[in-house]
């Protein structure tokens, strides 16, 4: 669920979103001022997450990626809780005729809360605004979490298995040119909004504890 944020100086402007655990985050475009946050996110990835993101457990990828993501030839969006970056999605600008390749990374502790799905939605919207018709990605077949995010996004997608990897193409031209074809995308967004809304109300309807004010030990008191 995206809630427009009142106009404010860049780079803070963005969209307030509700995650599936009931918490909120701010999604906005990234710039050079976010380099340290991007670096901290990727450096924090555990070995398994690093392998799924960079196809390697080497620390070289995480050390180099921050400068790439905040470069002028990249479109990148990030999800923040306060000053902490929960996740990032980005693609590099390519010459006409070449489909940009996108990537998403989410901090381990914040996975399975809708961060990846929301980042993908915002990145796709930014790509459409920039006239991008398709986004591509190479995803490890073992990266079930990312494949789940892509398949549940509602964005028209084609995939080609190639050994341990799967080549993904997101067809954004349908989102821009043929509104009738966006029904699946709209349904997916509404479904995530409903899940997030329900999660935000769970503490009210399913509290872990109750506090009764005014309890007394005397039988003749109102609290008794």
Image (cartoon, rainbow, N blue to C red):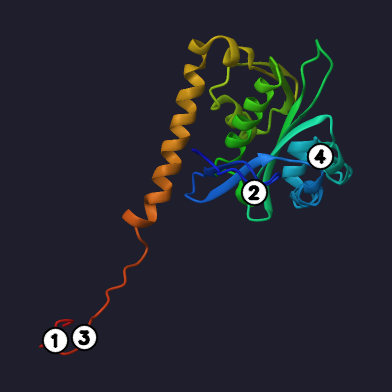
**86 above or below 139?**
below
List x then y, in percent, for residue 158: 64, 15
Pointer 4 residue: 70
Pointer 2 residue: 80
Q: Earlier in the sequence, mark 4 or mark 3?
A: 4
Pointer 3 residue: 216
Q: Earlier in the sequence, mark 2 or mark 3?
A: 2
Q: Nearer the viewer, residue 182 or 56?
A: 182
SS state under label 2: strand
CA–CA distance in space, label 1 to label 2: 50 Å
Query: Residue lying farthest bottom?
Result: 218
Mark 1 touches mark 3? (CB < 8 Å): yes
Q: Nearer the viewer, mark 4 or mark 1?
A: 4
CA–CA distance in space, label 2 to label 3: 45 Å
Q: Residue at x 63, y 12 (%)?
A: 173
Q: Earlier in the sequence, mark 1 or mark 3?
A: 3
Looking at the image, residue 214 sits to the left or right of residue 63; the answer is left
Q: Residue at x 42, y 47 (%)?
A: 199
């Amino acid at each position: 669920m995206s809630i427009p944020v009142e106009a404010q100086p860049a780079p803070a402007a963005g969209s307030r979103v509700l995650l599936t655990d009931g918490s909120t985050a701010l999604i906005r475009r990234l710039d050079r001022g976010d380099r340290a946050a991007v670096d901290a996110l990727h450096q924090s990835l555990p070995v398994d997450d690093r392998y799924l993101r960079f196809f390697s457990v080497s620390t070289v990828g995480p050390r180099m990626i921050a400068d790439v993501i905040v470069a002028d030839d990249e479109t990148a969006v990030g999800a923040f809780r306060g000053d902490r970056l929960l996740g990032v999605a980005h693609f590099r600008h390519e010459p006409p005729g070449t489909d940009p390749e996108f990537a998403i990374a989410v901090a381990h502790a914040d996975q399975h809360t809708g961060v990846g799905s929301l980042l993908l939605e915002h990145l796709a919207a930014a790509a459409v605004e920039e006239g991008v018709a398709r986004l591509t990605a190479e995803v490890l077949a073992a990266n079930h979490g990312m494949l789940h995010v892509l398949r549940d996004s509602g964005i028209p997608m084609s995939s080609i298995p190639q050994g341990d990897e799967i080549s993904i193409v997101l067809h954004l031209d349908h989102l821009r040119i043929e509104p009738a074809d966006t029904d699946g995308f709209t349904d997916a967004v509404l479904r995530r909004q409903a899940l997030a809304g329900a999660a935000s109300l769970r503490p009210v309807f399913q509290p872990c504890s109750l506090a009764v004010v005014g309890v007394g030990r005397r039988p003749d008191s109102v609290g008794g």
